[in-house]
Image: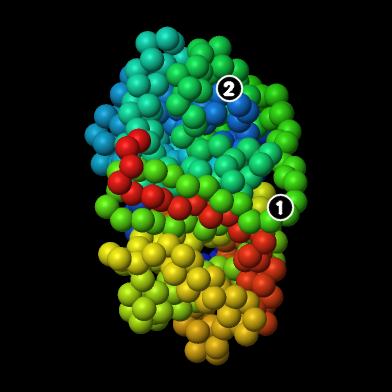
């Protein structure tokens, strides 16, 4: 039973989601929500860089580009042209665990969107010209976001330190040599398996009649064949037995520091507690690291923390851009002292209340739109195994106490379990 979630004056009954599965394995979740005459349509493929192997790293992200190159009924670049002609827009993203395509549009355009999406799921155009065109686009994207980016390079290096065996060790965009190496046959094999209806779910939220919408989806997708099961992921990772370090030389203006610890999986009850720890440490001007490192000691010009939920244990990150004249050793000492203090004493009641309030605000903001609801349902099912978890996030945060934050910081942000990447500026690439 999912408790109603109050968003402003509205109460969202997530138990009202109509959940069905077509005979080919395609999962369909429809939530009728008529607060505005709009619809958000999200297609989630349960595949990301986690499902790749050396030699074809980056193929999940490459497919995000390939999916806009035409299919049987709609030719190259027609997807957005047709959708925009109906007043809608689309986008997509790829992560370590999944790939998502979404459209937001007026309710009257639903049949057009179902037609467009089912067309490319059933008969995507996969020829050499399309592959070469998108390969070059992705290579340029990698140069921009990673090879020429200070924190892109550092994050790529850090993930390779944190993970020695797990597929999370390579970047979502892939290694440059692999992007160049991916063949049309690799794409055809990937599409047949990973983009089959049996590996996908549609989240449809907005001003729709659930019965009519379900019939529409059945009409356009029902004849698509189910695919073979996804190969199992080699998710093992050896225990870390000491601090790991790396150094990157890059012509930057100032040194920088990136520290990572392997955290829990999204399904762990510790994930919510680590979210609160993240806020206590580095979210907002009142957070510990911002207050001490930026304002009191003037050691850094910025500090951030992040913990993205993943299917398998992910990474808790802290990044710092050093202030002019500051030394890396001094920043590390101040940073690690404050993390240790939180792990030894836990947050104060005021810090905990502030963290809960910020997280509650973020969750309610996400659930306040059709787009946010569709994304939340999809993320919950992909990462936690049940779309109903989208309505339970606030309960999990409310259940976290100071002792829980203290415990997870002490357990996961252990000095012996951290990995550290330092940027040394001024050197040539």
Identify the image quadrant of the C terminus.
top left
Give the percent coordinates (x, y) of residue 47: 59, 36
Whether residue 240 is visible: yes
Relative vertical location of residue 361 with respect to residue 296 in this rendering, above or below:
above
Q: Given contact means CB atoms under 8 Å apart, are the residues at marks 1 and 2 in contact?
A: no
Residue 95 in sight in this render: no
At x 45%, y 78%, the residue is 288
Above or below, 73 relative to 42: above
Mark 2 Cα shell of 10 Å, populated few (<14), some (14-19), many (≥20):
some
Figure quadrant of the N terminus: bottom right
Q: Residue at x 46, y 34 (%)?
A: 173
Q: Residue at x 58, y 54 (%)?
A: 419
**Residue furthest top as drawn:** 128
The residue indicated by pointer 2 is 55
Is 347 situated above or below 424? below
Image coordinates for residue 309, horizontal then vertical, percent:
58, 56
Q: Which residue is mark 1?
A: 240
* Residue 176 located left or right of residue 133: right
Asked which secondary structure carries label 1, the reply is: loop
Q: Which residue shows up at 64% across the image and 81% down it? A: 344
x, y percent for residue 122: 52, 22
Q: Quadrant of residue 52?
A: top right
- Between residue 92 and residue 330, name the one nearer to us: 330
Looking at the rendering, which quadrant does residue 115 occupy?
Answer: top left
Q: Position of residue 160 (x, y in %)?
A: 57, 42
Which SS class for mark 2? loop
Nearest to viewer (mark 1 / mark 2):
1
* Number of numbered discs: 2
Q: Earlier in the sequence, mark 1 or mark 2?
A: 2
């Amino acid at each position: 039973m999912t408790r109603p979630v109050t968003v402003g004056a509205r109460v969202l009954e997530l138990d009202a989601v109509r959940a069905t599965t077509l005979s080919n394995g395609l999962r369909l979740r429809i939530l009728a929500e008529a607060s505005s005459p709009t619809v958000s349509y999200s297609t989630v493929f349960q595949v990301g860089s986690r499902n790749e192997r050396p030699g074809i790293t980056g193929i999940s992200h490459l497919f995000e580009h390939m999916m806009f190159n035409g299919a049987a009924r709609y030719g190259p670049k027609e997807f957005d042209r047709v959708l925009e002609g109906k007043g809608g827009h689309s986008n997509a993203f790829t992560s370590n665990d999944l790939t998502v395509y979404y459209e937001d549009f007026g309710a009257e355009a639903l049949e057009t969107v179902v037609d467009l999406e089912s067309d490319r799921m059933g008969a995507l155009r996969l020829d050499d010209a399309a592959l070469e065109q998108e390969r070059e686009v992705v290579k340029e994207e990698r140069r921009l976001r990673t090879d020429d980016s200070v924190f892109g390079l550092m994050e790529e290096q850090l993930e390779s330190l944190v993970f020695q065996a797990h597929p999370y060790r390579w970047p979502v965009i892939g290694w440059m040599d692999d992007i160049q190496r991916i063949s049309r046959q690799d794409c055809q094999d990937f599409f047949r398996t990973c983009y089959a209806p049996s590996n996908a779910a549609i989240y449809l939220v907005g001003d729709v009649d659930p019965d009519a919408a379900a019939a529409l989806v059945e009409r356009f997708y029902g004849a698509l064949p189910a695919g073979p099961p996804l190969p199992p992921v080699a998710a093992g990772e050896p225990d870390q037995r000491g601090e790991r370090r790396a150094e990157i030389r890059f012509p930057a203006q100032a040194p920088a520091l990136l520290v990572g610890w392997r955290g829990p999986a999204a399904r762990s009850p510790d994930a919510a507690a680590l979210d609160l720890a993240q806020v206590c440490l580095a979210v907002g001007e009142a957070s510990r690291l911002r207050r001490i490192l930026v304002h009191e000691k003037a050691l850094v010009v910025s500090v951030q923390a992040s913990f993205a939920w993943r299917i398998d244990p992910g990474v808790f990150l802290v990044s710092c851009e050093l202030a002019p004249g500051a030394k890396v050793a001094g920043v590390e000492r101040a940073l690690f002292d404050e993390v240790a203090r939180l792990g030894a004493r836990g947050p104060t009641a005021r810090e905990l209340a502030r963290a809960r309030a910020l997280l509650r605000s973020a969750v309610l903001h996400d659930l306040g739109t059709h787009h946010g609801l569709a994304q939340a349902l999809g993320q919950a099912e992909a990462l936690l195994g049940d779309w109903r978890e989208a309505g339970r996030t606030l309960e999990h945060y409310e259940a976290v106490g100071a002792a829980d934050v203290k415990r997870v910081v002490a357990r996961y942000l252990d000095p012996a379990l951290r990995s550290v990447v330092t940027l040394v500026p001024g050197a040539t690439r």
